[in-house]
């Protein structure tokens, strides 16, 4: 299994949070036993840290109307040119692996393994396991995104609803593989323990009044949540401290 990280931006550099997050991601992956050669970082600019060097792609992979959908453009390019017959775990720079896991934990799937939001049927594309035969699914998602000017999660759900035969190629994973602060009570009870990932930003972001979030550092790193649980283990907490997040 390969560990895939992607960051494409028109300014050809990491943003303020991402400058720190990418270092935490690489340090954390190495600490969990990933080899540098198993970590694939795709950017549209030169970058190297701790033995991991970015594969530089063209800036036209950036999706202007929905930057998160840029990942789909990169998936298509990788499936066409680079990927081998194995499993690739893509995760956003704000999805942190908490515990070791491998292919045996994910189990068998045909093309894509992904989590939903728990009580919401929408898929969360922040953490996706896929094989190169998922290229046609990604191409359908891209077509729908650009046609309707919508995000990739909307396009993915729409695709599955319209083309029910694709369900056989998609496996829905336990929320543990993309754990957020949404629906915390029910999702935490449903999640496999120990939690495998934590999905959160550590910078200050505008509050969405329709979907307010608790302070994410307090929630994930300091145990200030409904159950008083420090979700991020001490091992990873040390890496966050090393990079000045707390």
Image (cartoon, rainbow, N blue to C red):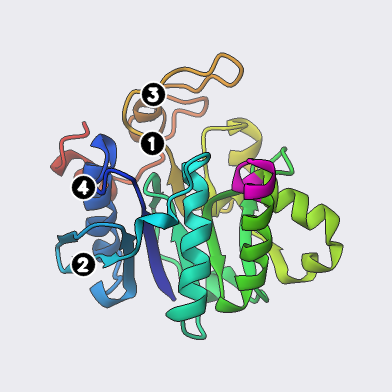
The residue wearing badge 4 is: 239
- Measured in 3D between alpha carbons, the distance from the residue under mark 3 to the one under mark 2, in whole angstroms, is 29 Å
The residue wearing badge 3 is: 205
Q: Position of residue 150 (x, y in %)?
A: 64, 41
Above or below, 210 against 58 in this view is: above
The part of the chain drawn in magenta is 145-153
The residue wearing badge 2 is: 52
The front one of 156 and 100 is 156
Q: Mark 2 or mark 3, which is nearer the start of the sequence?
A: 2
Q: Mark 1 or mark 4, which is nearer the start of the sequence?
A: 1
Residue 230's tag is 1
Nearer to us: label 4 or label 2: 2
- Measured in 3D between alpha carbons, the distance from the residue under mark 4 to the one under mark 2, in whole angstroms, is 17 Å
Q: Mark 1: give few (<14), some (14-19) or many (20+) Cα within 10 Å.
A: some
Q: Mark 2 or mark 4, which is nearer the start of the sequence?
A: 2
- Measured in 3D between alpha carbons, the distance from the residue under mark 4 to the one under mark 3, in whole angstroms, is 22 Å
**In terms of secondary structure, where does tag 1 sit?**
loop
Q: Main secondary structure of the magenta part?
A: helix
Quarter occupied by residue 217: top left
Residue 233 visible at all: yes
Q: Position of residue 147 (x, y in %)?
A: 68, 48
Q: Mark 3: give few (<14), some (14-19) or many (20+) Cα within 10 Å.
A: few
The front one of 39 and 140 is 140
């Amino acid at each position: 299994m390969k560990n895939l990280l992607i960051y494409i931006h028109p300014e050809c550099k990491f943003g303020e949070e991402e400058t720190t997050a990418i270092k935490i991601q690489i340090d954390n992956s190495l600490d969990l036993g990933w080899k540098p050669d198993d970590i694939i970082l795709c950017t549209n600019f030169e970058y190297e840290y701790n033995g991991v060097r970015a594969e530089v792609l063209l800036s036209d992979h950036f999706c202007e109307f929905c930057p998160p959908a840029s990942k789909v453009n990169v998936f298509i390019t990788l499936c066409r040119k680079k990927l081998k017959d194995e499993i690739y775990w893509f995760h956003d720079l704000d999805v942190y692996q908490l515990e070791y896991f491998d292919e045996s934990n994910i189990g068998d799937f045909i093309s894509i393994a992904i989590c939903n939001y728990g009580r919401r049927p929408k898929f969360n594309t922040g953490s996706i396991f896929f094989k190169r035969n998922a290229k046609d699914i990604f191409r359908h998602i891209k077509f729908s995104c650009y046609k309707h000017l919508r995000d990739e999660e909307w396009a993915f759900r729409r695709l599955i609803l319209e083309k029910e035969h694709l369900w056989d190629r998609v496996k829905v994973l336990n929320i543990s593989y993309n754990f957020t602060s949404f629906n915390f009570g029910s999702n935490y009870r449903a999640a496999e323990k120990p939690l495998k990932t934590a999905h959160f930003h550590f910078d200050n972001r505008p509050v969405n009044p329709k979907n307010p979030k608790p302070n994410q550092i307090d929630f994930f790193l300091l145990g200030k949540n409904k159950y008083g649980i420090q979700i991020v283990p001490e091992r990873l907490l040390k890496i966050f401290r090393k990079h000045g997040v707390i």
